[in-house]
Amino acid sequence: MKRYETRGLRLILREIGYFLANALGSIFSWEFVTVFVPLLLIWELLPRSGAVPKSLVPPLSTVAVTFWEMLTQKHLPTHIGHSMGKFFLGLGAAVITAIPIGILMGWNMAVRKRVLPLFQLLAPVPPPAWVPITIILFGVGLPMQTFLIFIGAFYPILFNTYQAIKDTEPRYLASARVFGASELTLILHVYIWHAIGSIIMSVKTGVAMGLVMLVIAEMYGGRTGLGYVLVEAKDFFQIPVMVVCMTVLGVIGWFLIEILKFVEIKLSVWKIGR
Amino acid sequence: MIEAKGITKFFSIVNEDRTAAGLTAVLSVSLKIGDGRIVSILGPSGCGKSTFLEILAGLQAPTEGEVYIDGVRVLEPLPSTRREMEDYRRRYQFLSPLANGLFRDRPKHDIAMIFQDYAVFPWMTALQNVTFALKLRGVARAEREERALPFLKAAGLGDSLDKYPSQLSGGMRQRLALARALAVEPKIILMDEPFAAVDTITRERLQDDLLKLWEATGITMVLVTHDTDEAIYLSDEVVIFSPPPGEVRNVFQVESLRPRRRNDPEHLDLKRRIDALFKYDIDHESEYSI
């Protein structure tokens, strides 16, 4: 029993190691460092030398100090936590609803004909256009923010999943059908696997749109979260704080995309020969 | 026993200038394929032989005609009148006529089919491909692996059980497809140019493997091919399809005893006759393309 546990733990640690090597590999590659470090130096030196006004473009060191202050004294971790909580609620709701609906629409003509036109009419509404009515319906707070993130992430996931499922190679379906596959088996063992790359790609798009809507939602309502800190910083003209928030959002987005890339590699081992 | 009665398949097409056009892929084909026989369907490309095979398998509905496998009707033909069409639409509005049912895996007929490409599922390992087919035939989970292994070993895949198709060579992939088809122990195997994508040496080995398996099991085999040598070497009966629209041009019986030799003079003679037939068809193609 004990041995099993350590083996499981070791396996998890190894996977995390692979993930970090994969994710950080591109950033800490020698080729990129030769570009990245000079850029950081320019960022530091231009405001310091007075070429650009320091009050408008804070140098890197100021931003780093501000980041540390926010981290230790101004509850930045709490804000990040709140933002991520809302984000994952919204994104999770979008994934849980959009993927099954997309699969059903791609699988069955009857479902498609009844449901697809509705989404085609609703989808072109730009997600930020939902903000006013959402505030009136849900009030300012968690439900409204979650809903806005959901709206942002839902359509890209839905349409890409639908398209990928619809484009499943008919000969795979045919050979499974001749063996006797029921429709449920076809969905679980053929359609989904054939479309897995596109589905994960659609979730990546969903993450990007979800982050956009997260910031918008927090700017309009709420007293926590990165978007709120951003707006507050604008009111007090704290440019370093804004830069910190933007950087944190960027890193979060990058990190989530890297996680999805890793999941994709894990789920589509079969695509990579040898 | 497979019985095809007057199978016709007509596709309607919309041209670029939005005028309607039609294409007859298969024209009034009647065939009887007895139990335990190997029958090849041979013809130039585009003559509707693959379409015909899919109609036999119940993957496409014929425009006209009926197919029976052991006396059971395969797929009803597509509707031809407006009233029939409405009826058909209503009946199949939620589920395609090809579907086996929503939740329960159950084959309509005791057949297996092998496609040229897309033969095996690339997202399953060799072993999973076979056990998946067994699962669809209602074999209990505990027995699946046990039943799959002998077929995989016979196909020379004993060492590659956990490999994905992308890690196998073309010949091994086709052998895997064959092993999967045989593992479900069907009465009939339908093959759509199964060996077209592999090199000559591999192809000849696969053909010999196929014959060995056939001798051991006595499965009825229907093989679509454009390779005259392959058709003669493998089959009891060679059905020649004419250039489009695909009609049965001739049926040749190959009576030489098994095991056969590849360069049997009898075979060469037959090959000469078949090739002459194709040449004639190609020279007089204008007669067909009305």
Image (cartoon, coloured by chain):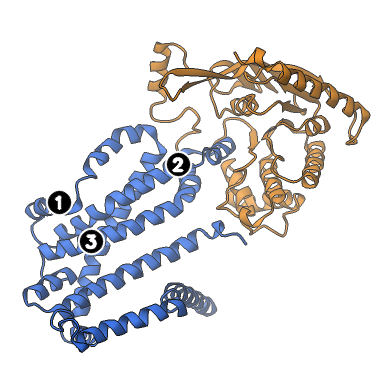
Q: A142 or A159, which is in the foreground? A: A159
Q: Which residue is mark 2?
A: A167
Give the letter of the orange chain: B
Q: B137 or A36, which is in the foreground? A: A36
Near mark 3 (Cα within 10 A), the count class, few <14, some 14-19 or many ≥20, is some
In this picture, residue A69 sits left or right of residue B144: left
Near mark 1 (Cα within 10 A), the count class, few <14, some 14-19 or many ≥20, is some
Q: Give the mark count.
A: 3
Look at 25% across and 68% down and name the residue there.
A84
* Colour representing chain A: blue
Residue A48 on image: x %, y %:
21, 88
Q: Which residue is mark 3?
A: A212
What residue occupies the far right of the structure in this picture? B265
Q: Which residue is mark 1?
A: A130
Residue A164 on image: x %, y %:
42, 46
Look at 64% across and 36% down and name the residue there.
B113
Q: Quadrant of residue A128?
A: bottom left
Q: CA distance from mark 1 to mark 2?
A: 31 Å
**Chain hosting mark 3:** A
Residue B111 on image: x %, y %:
64, 33
